[in-house]
Amino acid sequence: MALADDPALVERFARSEAQAFGGDRFQITDDGIWVPTPLAVIDEALAALADMNFWTDTMTCLDAGMGDGRIVAALALRGPGVRALGLETHPGLHALALANLRDLPPRWSVHKGSFLELASYAALDAPIAGVDVVLHYPDGGEQALARLFAAHGRPGARLVYLTPELRLRIEGVTHECTHRVTGGFHLHLFRVGA
């Protein structure tokens, strides 16, 4: 099921945008900025990954800097084999994510912490080496995130960056592909230790 197909989730995320921003178009966090990715972009990006035979029967996926939880929600809706995790340092956004995810199937967990600090991963339901996929909006922490996973993540783990940027260069990981998504966004896929 796509996020945009669930009217309750669409309304919930629209409310959380208004609540998080208070008139601004972004929220500054300790790890960067949060700008809400449109639900249609998230749905299309995850569908594009499905078209690439990306998803497996069992995957642990992390939204690094999850904001209000919209990508965690989309991942939780992928099916029973996908475990969706989220890390967010901003207390208000973390609280919004918890509220937004409350009625979803219990395949998700979110934690307050920095995706740039190894200690934050100890609170997750999976160690950093157990994460198969990391999703992130590049806002300044993308290189540090890649270095962290190159040093401590499992070989073969994937980093997925969803951004308006057509070109994205990330050091220490292997670029696999770039895919154009609706709304001027691009999906950049990298592999750790390959």
Image (cartoon, rainbow, N blue to C red):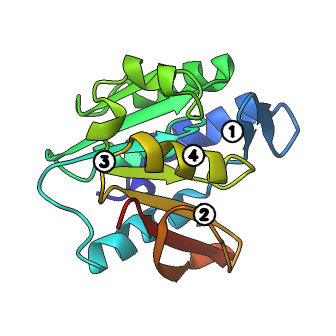
Query: Residue 145's mark?
Result: 4
Q: CA distance from mark 4 to mark 1?
A: 25 Å
Q: CA distance from mark 2 to mark 4?
A: 10 Å
Residue under pointer 2: 171
Residue at image position (59%, 27%) is 114
Using a 10 Å C-alpha cutoff, classify the residue at mark 2 as few (fewer than 14 neighbours), some (14 to 19) or many (20 or more). few
Residue under pointer 1: 17
Residue situated in front as seen by the camera: 26 or 143: 143
**Mark 2 or mark 4: which comes first in sequence?**
4
Where is residue 29 drawn, in percent x and y?
75, 30
**Mark 1 or mark 2: which comes first in sequence?**
1
Q: What's the residue type where badge 3 is placed? A: Arg
Where is residue 168 drawn, in percent x and y?
66, 72
Where is residue 178 drawn, in percent x and y?
52, 80
**Of helix, strand and loop, which one carries label 1?**
helix
Query: Exactly how many numbered labels are in the figure?
Result: 4
**Of helix, strand and loop, which one carries label 2?**
loop
Query: Mark 1, mark 2: which one is toward the viewer?
Result: 2
Instruction: Determine which quarter of the picture holds residue 167.
Output: bottom right
**Of helix, strand and loop, which one carries label 4?**
helix
Callout 3 touching callout 2 (CB < 8 Å): no
**Mark 4 or mark 1: which comes first in sequence?**
1
Residue situated in front as seen by the camera: 174 or 96: 174
Residue under pointer 3: 154
Callout 4 touching callout 1 (CB < 8 Å): no
Using a 10 Å C-alpha cutoff, classify the residue at mark 1 as few (fewer than 14 neighbours), some (14 to 19) or many (20 or more). many
